[in-house]
Image (cartoon, rainbow, N blue to C red):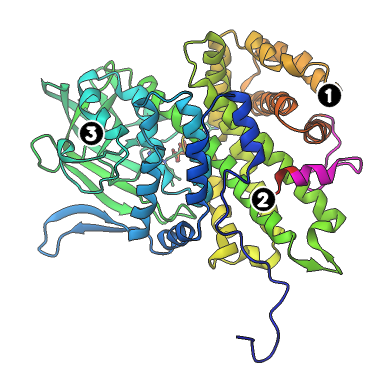
Amino acid sequence: MAAATHEVFNQPAPLVDANLFAINRPMQAALKFNAPALDTAPLQKLGQVAGSGEMQAHARLANVHTPQLKTHSRFGHRIDQVEFHSSYHALMTEAVGAGLHGAPWGEGAASPHLLRAAGFMLFTELEPSVLCPISMSYAVAPALRDNPAIYKDWSPGLTSRAYDLALKVWRDKAGLTMGMGMTEKQGGSDVRANTTRAEPAGSDGWGQRFTVTGHKWFFSAPMCDAFLILAQTKTGLSCLFLPRVLPDGSMNQLFIQRLKDKLGNKANASSEVEFVGATAWLVGEEGRGVPQILAMGTMTRLDCALGTSGLMRQALSIALNHTTQRKAFGKTLIDQPLMKNVLADLALESEAATALALRLARSFDHLDDPHEQVMSRLLTPVAKFWICKRGSHFAQEAMECLGGNGYVEEGGEGIMARIYREMPLNSIWEGAGNIMALDLLRALRKADTAAALAQELAPARGMHRALDHLADRLPARVEEMATEMEARRLAQDVALAVQAALLAQTAPPEVFGAFCDSRLDGQWGHSFGSLGSGTGFDAIIERAMPR
Ligand SMILES: Cc1cc2nc3c(=O)[nH]c(=O)nc-3n(C[C@H](O)[C@H](O)[C@H](O)COP(=O)(O)OP(=O)(O)OC[C@H]3O[C@@H](n4cnc5c(N)ncnc54)[C@H](O)[C@@H]3O)c2cc1C
């Protein structure tokens, strides 16, 4: 019905019921490059679901009706449960059903990690915060495998495509999820400061048992079925498996103190917990807990890069959808030269992030290949650092394309506000920016990274002067190893060089050329929208258009 005082017009229709995979050309190109024979049918299916209006409504509701902690029953018994809106469970059911959690470790599909990575990115466009427990349940396998008895019992549940939210003993559940607990009040990056203690308490079929006393200051998705945690044993910091429900069906001594009141990531519960004589089992070697749990951290860092790339793509799609419909000063916004510059610049950033994140994901499918092994070690901190660092700036600019509507929370296009609040998180958790840059220095110490990097850049040699210039110098800089003071700059330059080399092989010449001109050759300002006037704006925007 028309408003009584005015006609409503020039308000764009939101992007609803689009197949997020079918409209994402940069993703399709990156997949073709990394695994030419990949069967993308599951992504077509997931893209349809993730882009649907029905699932978008679930995403909105799960963020509006946030998780509530119930510490006690109405009869005064401690229950430590987190209550979620039914939309949260609907999202989890889809994510687990799509195999975005542990499935790649259990199924025989070709390129399972790459396939799952693309699915994870598509699902991020729907709702990123439920992907926290999904990511941890995916990431846990490489670390948990070092307790073969537990892995044997738990892996069928962790890889099952059934979402089972009941708090029950593992053997009675159709599907299982896992989380991780490292961060304590006195230190998160420097986990060596952990004070949580673990005392020996005998052994059983799952190996050495410990009694754990202490706390965790950040403990996301506390309704997961079990957690890998760090605690001090006599030998030093050790990695332990701590289930919520013990094998005899009784509740473990894990108490949720409160839920964090966070900037974004609202649908996900992040808690503070205490362990009061909780039971846990050793995973890996006693006293070697940090490298042990980092086998899990490596995979969650991959997901941070994938997640931010997904959010960038979503923000860009919404910005393109809006500006193709909205008019100002007599023209559609997208036809205004300066808006074209902003959108093209965002498109370059989004495609480069997609290319780098999926390249990294590919390496986990081929860890028996020495080059891929080096790439997984080198590119994990690089991609996590650079892509996540670019995320917040990207979201702000994409939001601005919608003007005031971008800043409003309400449904539809209000997703922009949610994206903006989510963006800084991938940069902070699982190792903040500086920690990633310092981790890059550690990676350089360990392997023949200079030669591997040169090999990675080789296919793009001779294609752009600025890339050649960077590629000439980078292996030597890698070999020399930067000081800590220079670590961020090195991480940035490795990221840009690898992104450029990937775009040379996967993207149209306009995208590759403009990326190198701007990011590598100084033809760029300090904000998005400052590409040089000779840029192929229309071709870049057409490539990114969500249709
Ligand atoms: C919503 C949310 C959920 C989370 N969920 C979990 C979870 O489930 N499990 C879990 O274990 N943790 C979780 N975390 C914690 C997160 O991983 C940590 O907050 C993060 O690792 C940083 O640790 P910190 O907060 O102790 O900060 P600090 O370690 O104090 O770091 C503060 C800053 O100092 C920088 N810094 C630290 N050391 C150095 C150095 N040597 N040189 C230069 N700079 C340095 C860091 O980069 C950072 O910018 C979560 C965090 C958030 C926000």
Residue 411: where, in percent of width, then height? 53, 66
Alpha-carbon distance for marks 2 and 3?
Answer: 46 Å
Q: Nearer the viewer, residue 303 or 523?
A: 303
Going from the N terminus, do you reach mark 2 or mark 1 first?
1
First in residue order: circle 2 vs circle 3: 3
x 63%, y 51%: residue: 315
* Kind of residue at disc 2: Arg
Question: Residue 263: image x %, image y %?
Answer: 49, 55
Residue assigned mark 1: 466
Q: Left or right: 123 with respect to 35?
A: left
Is the residue marked 2 within 8 Å of ligand 1, measured from its CB?
no
Residue annotated with mark 3: 242
Q: Amino acid at mark 3?
A: Leu
| Segment tinted magenta in the rendering | 521-542
- State whether residue 437 appears in this view: no
Is 532 placed left or right of 250 in the picture? right
Which residue has dot 2 on it? 547
Front in this rendered view, residue 446 or 313: 313
Q: Name the amino acid type tagged 1.
A: Ala
